[in-house]
Image (cartoon, rainbow, N blue to C red):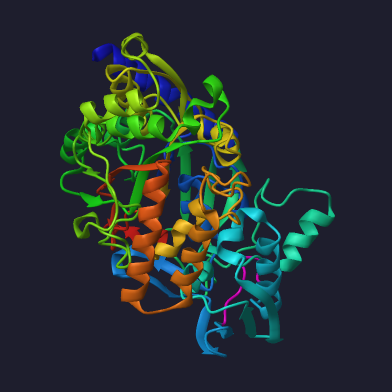
């Protein structure tokens, strides 16, 4: 343990030196008492909200730098009006007339309807955001402060679109791109958020500065620095040593020590997330073994979720059967209602499924190769630990799987391109069940890890998409619950997505700051202030 701690301290020192050097400071620079320090688990991929694909980066770009028509406050009930001051709905839920607030971008330019139109058109051309824009017919500016969004059909989950799509200043965006640069590769002031990027190094970290003319009032804390600390043990030591002021997604294996160090300035909340196991039934590995439904079923019965919860969340998470946490999403199907099939650890059923798949007792005893489990971002991460547990579960039940763990950005292209056998993936921050569209709908290219659209007819993907469309065509909660129960029931019957666990979120902060609200996913730096 002493050797491990010494290694973590050395690692932390190297990371700190890299951070200071990459962001313009010297390696001997002392900690600034007027700067708020936070952790990045991996480098920020871009300062453009459209290019950040991991949740850690989204917490910066999508909340602190950029804003949408709606905001997200998990501590106070979810979506709320942000850049949209008022919204009128007409034409049976198809036309949204939006009055904008009086706001300015960080460069001083006023927020206009043309900026909103420009931003939505950018997103609509990006297949990554098809799951939140495919229902939009057109976006127009009626006048300087009025936007009209016309939908192709009534869509009751439009709130998530209004939150997801952020508004960019058209003038600055085009100045950067016209100069031959890629927007997001450096600092800019093209958002309306309370902070802008002061210094940025993709391999090191990022420094933010408060926008004092922010339309909702100048932030209390003026300077913020994110330090890239990939190792969890190093992050805990950094917090204990006062190098980090706010530690979210704290390593649950270290939670008892973190609580002691935080002196009650901490909280443990149920995460609005899902970690799930996915099987690419189109994989060609081992003579397309995963195309066999009975093999996929055998895999599901072989997985011990309780063991995964213990390993991945230090026993603080919850076994999952639903894709979304019912406490956060009222229309989420509940396992307790019995509307869909669930899979609990059952070695006898797993064994029988392999026999039904055509394998002999001798083959099962020797171990049947089924491919590789791909996940991210590290061996010691919750998903990395889950992969090892699943590998062991499969081995005990006559199946052999390799484990491959990569950094998140390097992993995402293969996952989204269905270039894998099996994977452990996660989804976060859901407040409407229609968000499952990003995993189940064929228009969600660049977001889904399983592709159900199959010309050979393996699954009735049109039935799935029809249920998705019906779910947003009504705003009646009971109707939506019934529709989504049918959708999730069919999904479970495909034996391609298995919910594993809902995690817990450990959050701790130093005695230098006061935190007004605890949000499990999207914290707001404007909720922070210096302690008196």
Front residue of this view, candidates 75 and 469: 469
Q: Is residue 220 left or right of residue 337?
A: right
Whether residue 513 is visible to the viewer of this picture, yes or no, is: yes
Residue 459, x across and y down, in percent = 51, 48
Q: Quadrant of residue 41?
A: top left
Q: Is residue 507 left or right of residue 316?
A: right
| Of the pair 161 and 167, the residue shown nearer to us | 161
Above or below residue 463? Residue 141 is below
For residue 482, side relative to residue 268 (left or right) = right
- Classify residue 261 by image quadrant: top left
Magenta part of the chain: 102-108
- Residue at 52 percent of width and 33 percent of height: 19
Q: If the image is split into quadrants, where does the N terminus sit? A: top left
Q: Nearer the viewer, residue 341 or 39?
A: 341
The image quadrant of residue 331 is bottom left
Q: In the picture provided, is 182 more to the left or to the right than 387? A: right
Does the magenta portion include 154? Answer: no
Q: How many marks?
A: 0
Q: Quadrant of the C terminus?
A: bottom left
Q: Position of residue 306 (x, y in %)?
A: 20, 35
User: Which of the pair 523/465 is nearer the observer?
Assistant: 465
Image: 233 above or below 91: above
Could you tell me which residue is drawn at 61 percent across and 46 percent down?
A: 46
Q: Is residue 499 above or below residue 160?
A: above
- Residue in the image at 52% along x and 58% along y: 62
Is residue 509 visible from the viewing direction of this image? no
Where 171 sits versus 350, above or below? below
Q: Residue at x 46, y 45 (%)?
A: 56
């Amino acid at each position: 343990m002493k050797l491990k701690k010494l290694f973590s301290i050395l690692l932390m020192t190297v990371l700190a030196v890299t951070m200071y050097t990459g962001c313009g400071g010297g390696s001997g620079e002392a900690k600034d008492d007027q700067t708020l320090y936070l952790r990045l688990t991996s480098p920020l991929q871009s300062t453009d909200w459209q290019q950040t694909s991991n949740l850690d980066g989204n917490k910066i770009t999508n909340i602190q730098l950029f804003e949408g028509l709606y905001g997200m406050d998990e501590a106070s009930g979810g979506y709320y009006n942000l850049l949209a001051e008022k919204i009128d709905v007409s034409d049976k839920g198809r036309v949204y007339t939006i009055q904008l607030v009086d706001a300015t971008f960080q460069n001083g330019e006023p927020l206009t309807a043309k900026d909103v139109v420009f931003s939505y058109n950018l997103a609509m051309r990006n297949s990554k955001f098809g799951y939140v824009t495919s229902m939009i017919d057109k976006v127009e500016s009626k006048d300087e402060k009025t936007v009209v969004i016309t939908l192709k059909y009534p869509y009751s989950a439009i709130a998530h679109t209004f939150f997801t799509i952020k508004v960019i200043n058209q003038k600055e965006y085009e100045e950067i791109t016209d100069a031959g640069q890629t927007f997001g590769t450096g600092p800019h002031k093209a958002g309306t958020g309370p902070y802008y990027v002061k210094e940025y190094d993709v391999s090191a970290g990022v420094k933010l500065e408060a926008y004092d003319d922010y339309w909702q009032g100048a932030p209390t804390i003026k300077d913020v620095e994110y330090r890239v600390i990939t190792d969890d043990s190093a992050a805990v030591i950094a917090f204990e040593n006062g190098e980090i002021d706010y530690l979210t997604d704290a390593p649950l294996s270290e939670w008892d020590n973190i609580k002691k160090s935080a002196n009650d300035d901490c909280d443990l909340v149920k995460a609005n997330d899902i970690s799930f196991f996915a099987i690419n039934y189109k994989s060609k590995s081992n003579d397309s073994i995963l195309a066999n439904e009975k093999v996929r079923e055998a895999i599901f019965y072989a997985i011990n979720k309780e063991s995964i919860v213990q390993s991945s969340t230090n026993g603080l998470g919850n076994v999952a059967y639903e894709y979304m946490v019912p406490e956060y999403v009222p229309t989420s199907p509940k396992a307790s209602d019995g509307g869909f099939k669930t899979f609990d650890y059952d070695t006898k059923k797993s064994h029988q499924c392999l026999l039904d798949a055509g394998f002999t007792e001798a083959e099962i005893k020797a171990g049947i190769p089924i491919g590789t489990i791909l996940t991210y971002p590290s061996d010691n991460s919750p998903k990395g630990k889950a992969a090892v547990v699943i590998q062991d579960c499969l081995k005990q039940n006559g199946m052999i799987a390799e484990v491959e763990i990569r950094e998140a950005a390097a992993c995402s292209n293969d996952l989204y391109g269905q270039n894998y056998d099996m994977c452990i993936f996660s989804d976060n921050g859901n407040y409407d069940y229609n968000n499952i569209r990003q995993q189940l709908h064929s228009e969600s290219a660049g977001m889904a890890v399983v592709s159900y659209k199959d010309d050979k007819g393996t699954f009735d993907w049109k039935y799935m998409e029809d249920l998705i469309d019906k779910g947003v065509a009504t705003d009646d909660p009971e109707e939506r619950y019934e529709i989504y129960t049918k959708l999730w029931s069919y999904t479970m019957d495909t034996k391609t997505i298995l919910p594993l666990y809902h995690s817990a979120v450990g959050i701790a902060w130093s005695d230098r700051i006061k935190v007004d609200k605890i949000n499990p996913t999207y914290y707001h730096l404007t909720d922070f202030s210096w302690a008196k």
